Amino acid sequence: MTRVLFVTSEVYPVIKTGGLADVSASLPEALCRQCHDVHILLPGYPAAMKAARASGSRRQARLVIGQYSVALWRTRLPGTSVTLWLVDCPGLFDRPGNPYQNEEGEDWWDNAHRYQLFCRVAAMMATGQAGLRWTPDIVHCNDWQSGLVPVFLEPAPNRPPVVFTIHNLAYQGLFSHDTFRALGLPDSLWRFDRLEFHGQLSFIKGGLVYADRITTVSPGYAAEIQTPGFGYGLEGLLQYRSEHLSGILNGIDTKLWNPATDQYLDCHYDADTLASKQECKAALQKQLGLVPGDAPLLGSIGRLVEQKGIDWLLDALPPLLQQGCQFAILGSGEIRYTEPLRALAKTHPGQLSLTIGYDEPLAHRITAGSDLFLMPSRFEPCGLNQMYSLRYGTVPVVHRVGGLGDTVLDPDQVGHSQANGFSFYEPTGGAFRTSVERALECRQQRKRWRQLQSNGMAGEYSWKERAREYGKLYQTLLEERCLTR
């Protein structure tokens, strides 16, 4: 049994801003099912602390780190048997709403201090300095918020090996040199081959430079981030560390995302009862005030930001609306996208529904009730929504990048007998709209459309095999460590 400390800044259902939270819940649970002992470490955000106290959990340790008094609470991730540790430091983490930003959408001014402390606690747990009975064999860090963990562990004798997973290289944790000084980090780290990045402190470079292994969330993205187009200036470092870099495709929680048992659906279906999917569509149309009927219903769920290709979607909406298509859009993001979407929803009542924010039940209903699912992302490290839609027999239309290219197979690539969706390669709005038109044309060919749906629903999207890959990686690191001692 391998003991793993899984360090993450968000985990569903405690706190979620994106796919990291889903992965941070489902991967540890899958690893535990394969007899690994995985403990998650999470900042003590208000919702997390409230749930821990309500469950009767108690403090397990007290630490003093600089000017801060920190308590470690041990509880369980709701709905699982996975151990969850909370870093209780009210001065840094007892704040409302989004874990990274205030109510105006601005980054918390002290994010560097907040996540440096979080990383120091992780390093203390990893080296037995937190006063706990449990210590890990492996530390698994995720994204920039945990990027300083391998930095702090580097000089520690007999430290556990560290895996660092990149979920989205676009978010790097960049701060000023003054902040570097304020954190009290040693001058030796202010070098281009360590934490300095074009005159700034880069948290993510801590993971990329000092981790024993780097993983990312799809094979396609692992290759892309070693190129200038997707590397955000770090492609040279990633090329240098390519022997220690691999892509392991994310899985999904197939218990939570299952059209045959989904708690958020009014009716259920599977590959043998696909006709019942129309009942989900009718229920969604009724809920969102869309005109009932067989008009193509296109769903979109996610952040309304440039990365997600929302400008391409906006360009495609007017002609598709004119053709009679309906849209169910759920997400939040930049005003330059939300305002035009609001205007279209206002001028096309009964045809376009826009819900600003995030609504988990509605996300499931859109996934089940839509005919097509749209993901025109400019880049997408892995993507989970396309796998949810495939599992629900909702045909995805995606940009052929990262994990989207690894999971969605276009008829032009593999033929209709193996295809499960539609994709476009050229990064343009025109290419996106052409792919949507191809999908709508295929929808008129019932036999081919049903084949696409069946192929998608037959895919393997669970964490079972992916968790085995992580387990093999952990074992390789432990064997390497034994050889060097």
Image (cartoon, grey):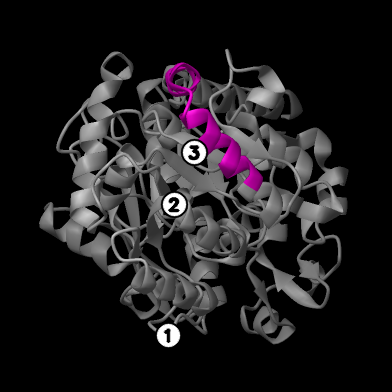
- Residue 401: x percent and y percent? 68, 42
The part of the chain drawn in magenta is 434-454
**Image depth: mark 2 or mark 3 in front:** 2
Q: To which residue does mark 2 refer?
A: 300
Instruction: Check the picture and name the quadrant holding the C terminus.
Output: top right
Q: Is residue 248 magenta?
A: no
Q: Residue at x 58, y 42 (%)?
A: 437
Numbered circle sitting on residue 404 = none
Splitting the image into 4 quarters, where does residue 439 fall?
A: top right
Q: CA distance from mark 2 to mark 3?
A: 10 Å
**Image depth: mark 3 or mark 1 in front:** 3
Q: Above or below — where is 123 with respect to 176?
A: above
Q: Above or below — where is 416 with respect to 42?
A: above
Q: Is residue 435 magenta?
A: yes
Q: Above or below — where is 101 with respect to 299?
A: below
Mark 3, residues whose alpha carbon is within 10 Å: few (<14), some, or many (≥20)?
Answer: many
Q: To which residue does mark 3 refer?
A: 386
Mark 1, residues whose alpha carbon is within 10 Å: few (<14), some, or many (≥20)?
Answer: few
Direction from residue 157 to residue 86 in the image, left or right: left
Q: Earlier in the sequence, mark 3 or mark 1?
A: 1
Q: To which residue does mark 1 refer?
A: 104
Label pair 3/1, CB-CB below 8 angstroms: no
Amino acid type, mark 1 = Glu
Instruction: Choose between 114 and 428: the one closer to the eye.
Output: 428
Amino acid type, mark 3 = Gln
Q: Residue at x 85, y 60 (%)?
A: 193
Q: Residue at x 27, y 51 (%)?
A: 362
The secondary element bearing badge 2 is classed as strand
Direction from residue 314 to residue 325 in the image, left or right: left
